[in-house]
Amino acid sequence: MTLSRLLENRNFLGAVFMLPAVLLLLVFLTYPLGLGTWLGFTDAKIGRDGVWVGLENYIYLFGDQVARLSLFNTLIYTSVATAVKFVLGLWLALLLNKNLPFKSFVRAVVLLPYIVPTALSALAFWWIYDTQFSIVSWGLMRLGLIDHYIDFLGDPWLARASVIVANVWRGVPFIAICLLAGLQTISPSYYEAAVLDGATPWQMFRYITLPLLTPIIAVVMTFSILFTFTDFQLIYVLTRGGPLNATHLMATLSFQRAIPGGSLGEGAALATAMVPFLLAAILFSYFGLQRRAWQQ
């Protein structure tokens, strides 16, 4: 009787059905996060256990010039790439929402940069940016705009701009498709009423499209910031953090210090230091972009 009552209890059944997901999260998310946080407070090295050192790793990283540079690079990389991806993604979504010829085919083509493996995309851009065989430099030279090949990945600021371009090329389709899905949920009757009232296209975008699309924008931009801030594959394959650590992000530097460098504690501390920035992005999305009062 007790078992039959439990099986009829919706709360009990909900907990049972959620148990496999909870176990997976505990094993593959909570445990690695907890272990990484613990290692950040130790002097663990590869091949030996560490001892508790408290905040020593964090104090060292705070004074480490390369670690501070990686934070600067990460903030520049995330802010610029995310802003450009949003603008281009929104423009592309508005374009794809129109009645274009071969619309389904165009939407499928737009997704190609996102579904291509990141490592393969990075190798393609590595070839594009090559100092001897760059198709970009070759084209500019044939047009007479430059007189020598550009060293895209050899100059610190050019390298930063180059990896941002690669990230934008890869990330725009994700934002465009998500925003396109949001645009298709907006009723055409709003625009019909606005046209009857004499509204301009900009006014319709400002007072209809943008407010109704804001909840989707909040979710999409949160994921975009998280993905960009924690980017690893693109940078590691394309530049390995060079030149002169100019493209080292916190994720790539954490890996370099922990695995090739052998300092697990230091690498874990650097990775853990990323968490407050990620939480700040999530909180900004939840308490800022998701608020409806200012939309009205």
Image (cartoon, rainbow, N blue to C red):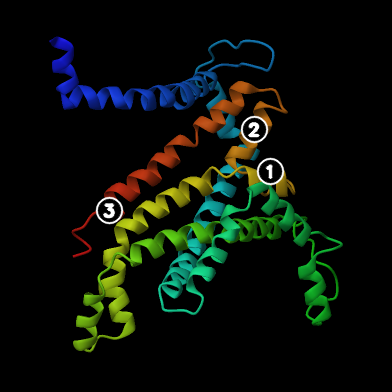
Distance from label 1 to label 2 (Cα)? 10 Å
Observer able to see residue 82: yes
- Residue pointed to by mark 1: 236
When the figure is inspected, residue 34 is found, relative to residue 294, above or below; the finding is above
Residue contact between numbered discs 1 and 2, judged by CB atoms under 8 Å: yes
In the image shown, does 188 or 10 lie closer to the viewer? 10
- Residue pointed to by mark 3: 290
Image x and y of residue 213, in percent: 31, 63
Could you classify mark 2 by the number of other residues whose Cα lies within 10 Å: few (under 14), some (14-19), or many (20 or more)? many
Q: Earlier in the sequence, mark 1 or mark 3?
A: 1
When the figure is inspected, residue 275 is found, relative to residue 188, above or below; the finding is above
User: As shown in the figure, which amino acid type bears the numbered disc 3?
Assistant: Gln
Q: Residue at x 34, y 49 (%)?
A: 284
User: As shown in the figure, which amino acid type bears the numbered disc 1?
Assistant: Tyr
Left or right: residue 80 compared with residue 276: right
Q: Residue at x 33, y 44 (%)?
A: 283
Query: Picture quarter containing residue 136?
Result: bottom right
Left or right: residue 10 compared with residue 111: left
Residue 7, disc: none
- Residue pointed to by mark 2: 255
Find numbered disc 1 in the image and state the secondary structure of the residue it sits on.
Answer: helix
Q: Residue at x 52, y 52 (%)?
A: 78
User: As shown in the figure, which amino acid type bears the numbered disc 2?
Assistant: Phe
Image x and y of residue 165, in percent: 62, 61
Query: Picture quarter containing residue 216?
Result: bottom left
Distance from label 1 to label 3 (Cα)? 34 Å
In the image shown, does 197 or 150 lie closer to the viewer? 197
Find numbered disc 2 in the image and state the secondary structure of the residue it sits on.
Answer: helix
Could you classify mark 3 by the number of other residues whose Cα lies within 10 Å: few (under 14), some (14-19), or many (20 or more)? some
When the figure is inspected, residue 264 is found, relative to residue 63, above or below; the finding is above
Image x and y of residue 275, in percent: 45, 35
